[in-house]
Image: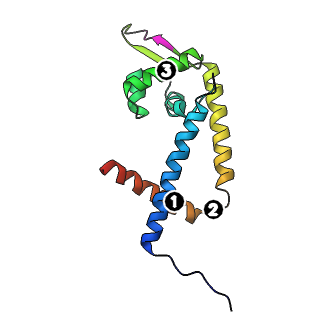
Amino acid sequence: MTATAPARSREAELESLRLALHGLLAAHRRLRSRDSRQAGAVGFAHYRLMAKLREVDGQTVSHLAAAADLSPATATEMVDALVTAELVARERDATDRRVVRVSLTPRGRRAFDAKRARFIAAWNRELADLDAGALEGATLVLERLTTFFERL
């Protein structure tokens, strides 16, 4: 006769989820901090901004800020750092000299693409043992939590 573990209550599972979310957010903060210390590399703090440029190059900082869900001041600081690292360049718009556009440099494209490839490979390795149903359930929970935080 085998003993089975007693089922945990819904309240206990919700608390486990809450603690797991706190752990996830803390790990993400540590990753961003650790990753930002690599000079000239694409850190996760810059990743979303560069991803928006990879989708549509030649955007203004204000458009980038909105697309990457950043404040204009934060986007400007990030662009400054990326210019210094020669990953992006600022250029005056050809038709309206008042407008400054930001574009990935060839080096920036290569660095971003390499970072994305490493991230996707690690992501796939980490989640390889989960079936489609588990991934669908996790996605549902994360989407629900996003809505929860937006409503708070």
Q: Main secondary structure of the magenta part?
A: strand
Q: Is residue 4 above or below residue 67?
A: below
Kindly report the distance in space between the C-alpha atoms of the residues bearing marks 1 and 2. Answer: 10 Å
Confirm whether residue 23 shows in the render. Answer: yes
Mark 3 residue type: Val
Q: Nearer the viewer, residue 75 or 51?
A: 75
Residue 130: percent from left, percent from top: 63, 62
Q: How many marks?
A: 3
Residue 120: percent from left, percent from top: 64, 44
Mark 1 residue type: Ala
- Location of mark 2 (residue): 130
Element assignment for label 1: helix
Looking at the rendered image, the quarter that the N terminus falls into is bottom right
Task: Residue at 58% x, 39% y: name it.
Answer: 31
- Location of mark 1 (residue): 138
Residues tagged 1 and 2 counted as in contact (Cβ below 8 A): yes
Classify residue 129 by image quadrant: bottom right
Magenta segment range? 90-94
Task: Residue at 62% x, 37% y: name it.
Answer: 116
* Coloring applied to the structure: rainbow
Element assignment for label 2: loop
Q: Is residue 125 magenta?
A: no
Task: Residue at 66% x, 53% y: name it.
Answer: 126
The residue most toward the left is 151
Say the numbered circle drawn on residue 79. 3
Element assignment for label 3: helix
Kindly report the distance in space between the C-alpha atoms of the residues bearing marks 1 and 3. Answer: 33 Å
| Residue 25 located left or right of residue 151 | right
Mark 2 residue type: Leu
